[in-house]
Amino acid sequence: MIAVAGNIFEHILSEALDEEFTELLAVEGIRIERIVSTGQASPPGFWYDQAWSERVLVLSGSAGLLFEDEPTPRELKRGDYLLIPAGRRHRVEWTDATEPTIWLAVHFGSLSSSGAAEADNPLSELSVRSVSSLRKSED
Amino acid sequence: MIAVAGNIFEHILSEALDEEFTELLAVEGIRIERIVSTGQASPPGFWYDQAWSERVLVLSGSAGLLFEDEPTPRELKRGDYLLIPAGRRHRVEWTDATEPTIWLAVHFGSLSSSGAAEADNPLSELSVRSVSSLRKSED
């Protein structure tokens, strides 16, 4: 079965140490997830370099997303969406410190390597996982 | 090119007669659009019967979505998402009369017939179209 219904603003852990990733849909070639950030940023010197494209939409909170080829971060606030083309290196400079930043992220195109697992299980149960690629700043 | 960036809550015509559809992403097998409803409902007796699956997410406003095989509409409010499996007949019983209802709709799976046009133009410019499948009630 699949995550048939739910509310994207519920089950927010505002004091979480790590960002929280909830997969909403994974079919061949596409994966949609909710990401909840609570002040985390990419570690110093870390760059995402993805083989697939990603569209992000900020549903609440705000964030600064820096492309390596741009001088300053783009500020994303509620409702803002942005395309991150495959291979365009980027990092999260900051996320809102006062309220959770809820992202809807759509990953698509050239998912053959990293997206293989999702493609094998096309309509998986709603899954919540927590990863440590982004951590809250220690200061 | 593609719709690189924007804000999903902007450019709302709150007095529009028809629903407004804005395509945010169309690649092979998937199409994501914003739908803005301002009180419209499906015409009497009309049922959507889609060959593909659709995930809807209500970002603002509210709506009543009725499946033909259920006795009463499901009320969707801000943040609620719902899967509409391919072939499950449904209709929009009502949308919020007091504020615009903004939907994010993800169409996926078995788009070969109706989605062919989008697949031919995988990264199309942001396009806004207005259709008349839903109209405001005349009363």
Image (cartoon, coloured by chain):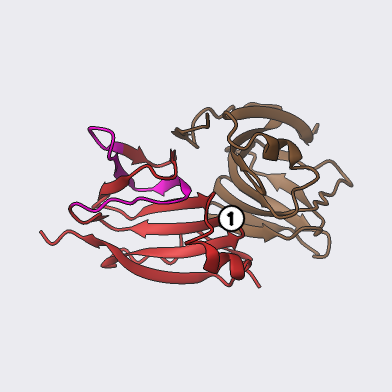
Chain colours: A red, B brown
* Residue A16 forms part of the magenta stretch: no
Residue sitting at x 76%, y 49%: B93
| Helix, strand or loop at mark 1 | loop
- Left or right of B107? Residue B3 is left
Q: Which residue is most to the left?
A: A139
Quarter that holds the N terminus of chain A: bottom right
Dot 1 falls on which chain? Answer: A
Q: Residue at x 48, y 58 (%)?
A: A33
Amino acid type of the residue tagged 1 in the rendering: Gly
Where residue A17 sits, quadrant-wise, is bottom left
Q: Which residues are magenta?
A: A45-74
Q: Does residue B15 lie above or below A88 as drawn?
A: above
Q: Name the image quarter holding residue B123.
A: top right
The residue shown at (61%, 28%) is: B127
- The residue where tag 1 is placed is A29
Residue A128 in picture, x, y percent from top left: 45, 70
Q: Image point 75% across, 53% down: which residue? A: B110
**Residue B126 seen anywhere in this rendered image of the structure:** yes
What residue occupies the far right of the structure in this picture? B45
Q: Between B10 and B32, which is closer to the camera in this rendering?
A: B32
Q: Nearer the viewer, residue A40 or B25?
A: B25
